[in-house]
Image (cartoon, rainbow, N blue to C red):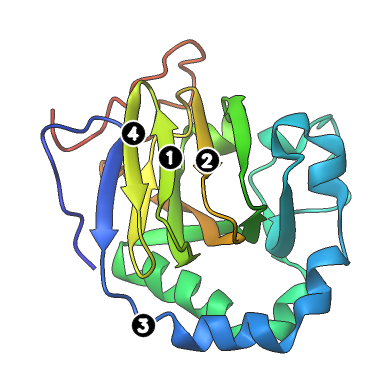
């Protein structure tokens, strides 16, 4: 995997295309009941209320002493549902290895037909130092994602990183469910694509992006 830099885009980086997603789709087709096992994200996070989620790697529980929000918890663990999706988890692990990074959280996310993820910012110490990646698995009309005033349309088999520290939103214009594999990578020092310095609480633009 080699990031494909585009000087026209500050908040997005395409990592790969034509990824073989058939094995991951087969896992999803074999376990449709898993979409309703844990509904906490769509119930508790208002901007995500139109989604369905399957957690593959999640924040360490219980939260460490002194932590009141998972957004500031760096440690993650393999979630129980991951046993149904070994190929999806293996893809995340392989991507982390090839990009010289450490895998964090990972989630399969379905966005319902004709619906959207509402604008928000992923705030907290965990997100600040990590790159967020999307592998498109199902998207019959493309997956528009907006961040920091930029918009890209992602297609099945494409892997993208984007700046989730900027205000962002997603849209599913099709009458079919859109599914992405979403995961976070902690890059090696100086290798981040869309990360912020750990102590810089007010910036939304990446400081270690190789474009600069």
Q: Distance of mark 1 from mark 2, alpha carbons?
A: 7 Å
Q: Distance of mark 1 from mark 4, alpha carbons?
A: 6 Å
Residue identifier under label 2: 171
Earlier residue among tags 2 and 3: 3
* In the image, farthest residue toward the front: 175
Please identify the quarter of the rendering in which residue 148 is found: top left
In the picture, measured across the screen, residue 164 lies left or right of residue 149, that is right
Q: Is label 1 in a helix, a strand or a loop?
A: strand
Earlier residue among tags 1 and 4: 1
Q: Nearer the viewer, residue 150 or 89?
A: 150
Cβ atoms under marks 1 and 2 closer than 8 Å: yes
Q: At x 72% / y 62%, what residue is drawn?
A: 55
Q: Distance of mark 2 from mark 4, alpha carbons?
A: 11 Å
Please identify the quarter of the rendering in which residue 119 is found: top right
Judge whether residue 209 can be spotted in this image: yes
- Tell me if mark 1 has few (under 14), some (14-19) or many (20+) residues whose alpha carbon lies within 10 angstroms of its own: some
- Tell me if mark 4 has few (under 14), some (14-19) or many (20+) residues whose alpha carbon lies within 10 angstroms of its own: some
Checking the image for residue 20, the label placed there is: 3
Q: At x 87% / y 41%, what residue is drawn?
A: 43
């Amino acid at each position: 995997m080699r990031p494909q830099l585009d000087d026209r885009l500050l908040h997005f980086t395409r990592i790969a295309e034509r990824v073989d997603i058939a094995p991951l789709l087969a896992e999803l087709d074999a376990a449709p009941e898993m979409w309703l096992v844990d509904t906490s994200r769509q119930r508790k996070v208002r901007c995500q209320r139109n989604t369905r989620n399957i957690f593959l790697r999640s924040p360490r529980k219980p939260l460490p002493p002194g932590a009141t929000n998972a957004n500031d918890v760096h440690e993650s663990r393999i979630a129980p549902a991951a046993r149904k999706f070994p190929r999806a988890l293996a893809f995340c692990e392989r991507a982390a290895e090839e990009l010289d990074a450490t895998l964090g959280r990972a989630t399969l996310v379905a966005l319902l037909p004709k619906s959207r993820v509402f604008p928000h910012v992923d705030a907290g110490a965990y997100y600040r130092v990590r790159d967020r990646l999307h592998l498109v698995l199902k998207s019959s009309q493309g997956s528009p994602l907006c961040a920091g005033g930029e918009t890209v349309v992602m297609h099945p088999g494409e892997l993208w990183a984007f700046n989730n520290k900027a205000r962002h939103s997603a849209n599913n214009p099709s009458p079919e469910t859109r599914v992405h594999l979403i995961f976070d990578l902690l890059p090696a020092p100086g290798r981040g694509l869309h990360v912020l310095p750990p102590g810089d609480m007010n910036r939304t633009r990446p400081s270690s992006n190789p474009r600069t």
